Image (spheres, helix red, strand yellow):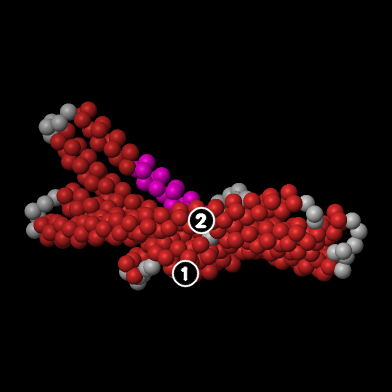
Amino acid sequence: MKGVKIISILLSILCIILILPHKISYAADELTTINLAKSKELLEEKNLELLSLKRQIELQEIIIEETNHEAKLWMDRLNDDSEGKRHENATKVYVNPIKEENKLASLQRQYQDKLFDLSNNLQEIYIDLLNITNKLNSLNKNLDIAKTVYQQKLTEVNLGLLPEKELLTFEVNIKAIERDIKQSENTKQLQFFSFNYMITGSTEIIYQPELMDIDEVLKTNYMELSDISYEELLEKQLEKSDTYQSYEELLREYEKILYVERNYSSSGAATTKTLQSIKNTELKMKDLRHKTMTSIMMSYYELMNKQLDIKIANNNLTISENKLKVAETKFELALISSTELLTEQLNHINAQQNYIEALNNYDISYINYIRYY
């Protein structure tokens, strides 16, 4: 029965791998709007990459059961047959089980890493869509400005104040903006597809992100960076590091191999080779520890710089808000043209976009920095 279960899981994994997007289609005329938290729930439940890893973990758990069962059977035959056979049997009893346990631990870490990365990617899609929406607003306002200017120039041509050939420049500008609008709309549709495929594994577009709350998502309560201990962060990162943990698991595996070689083999060369492998692995662990600490310190300084970026972007946003209010007042008093008002509106939209990008850049970096803290 276990063999049948393994085959079933393997077929499930193969099916997941072979499913590829082939067509963008809408499941309904009206899409369901979901927030970031809900989309992350769907991601963990239905994402194809995560499902594939879950199946591999299930398969590995079955393999461990079989390996442990085999180890028990060979335990009674450790001293049978020749030295070569004893060494082989001892490997099945002491080494093979820990090898399979290490594979399972690695798969579980891969799953958590993939879930973390995909969750960050999902947030990036929310931000990208918000920025695309802002860009479309900017482009449409820019198009209004370009058309207004074109009409002004056309009046000047009709009055004989401007040569007709001068209109070509303004016509080309309008066409360029219309092209950019179309490209942005296409990009938005592709992001909708990426968003849905990531959280459902389907090529149909069912959901759309709720963008109104994204700026609130980014304004979470952050810890003071100075309160976070480098040393504690280092230990927790190494504890969850797939590379570092694989070294530790390898050391435990070498210990079992060493035990088998010393008790069930007379080959001193094999023991010497294993001892050298242990030493090399310990050196790699020491080197990784140093590199991880260096990376933590560099990330800290990068976060400090990104905090400054947020302050600058926020100041620019405040300035643009004040300028827009002044422009709106002047426009009501007929002191400026609609073109000048639209220009200030466009500047304000750009300032909003820059502020959101600064928040997102800090948020993603912060999440990565304190991931295991």
Q: Amino acid at mark 1?
A: Ala
- Residue 258, horizontal then vertical, whole percent: 71, 59
Q: Residue at x 34, y 70 (%)?
A: 227
Left or right relative to 35: residue 268: right
- Nearest to the eye among marks 1 and 2: give it: 2
Q: Residue at x 36, y 46 (%)?
A: 181
- Residue 10, horizontal then vertical, whole percent: 74, 58
Which quarter of the figure is the C terminus placed in? Answer: bottom left
Question: Does the magenta-highlighted stretch encompass residue 212?
Answer: no
Question: Does the magenta-highlighted stretch encompass residue 182?
Answer: yes
Q: Is residue 85 visible?
A: yes
Q: Is residue 332 visible?
A: no
Left or right relative to 337: residue 251: right
Q: Residue at x 22, y 28 (%)?
A: 165
- Residue 368, horizontal then vertical, whole percent: 43, 61
Q: What span is colored magenta in the figure?
A: 178-195
Q: Amino acid at mark 2?
A: Lys
Judging from the image, what secondary structure is the residue with disc 2 in? helix
Report which residue position mark 1 lands on.
37
Q: Residue at x 53, y 60 (%)?
A: 241
- Residue 226, horizontal then vertical, whole percent: 32, 67
Asked whether 305 or 166 is in front, the reply is: 305
Does 332 appear above or below 217? above
Asked whether 111 or 195 is in front, the reply is: 111
Report which residue position mark 2 lands on.
286
Which quarter of the figure is the N terminus placed in? Answer: bottom right
Specify few, some or many for label 2: CA neighbours under 10 Å numbering under 14, 14-19, or 20 or more.
few
Asked whether 306 or 275 is in front, the reply is: 275
Left or right relative to 116: residue 359: left
Q: Magenta: predominant secondary structure element?
A: helix
Specify few, some or many for label 1: CA neighbours under 10 Å numbering under 14, 14-19, or 20 or more.
few
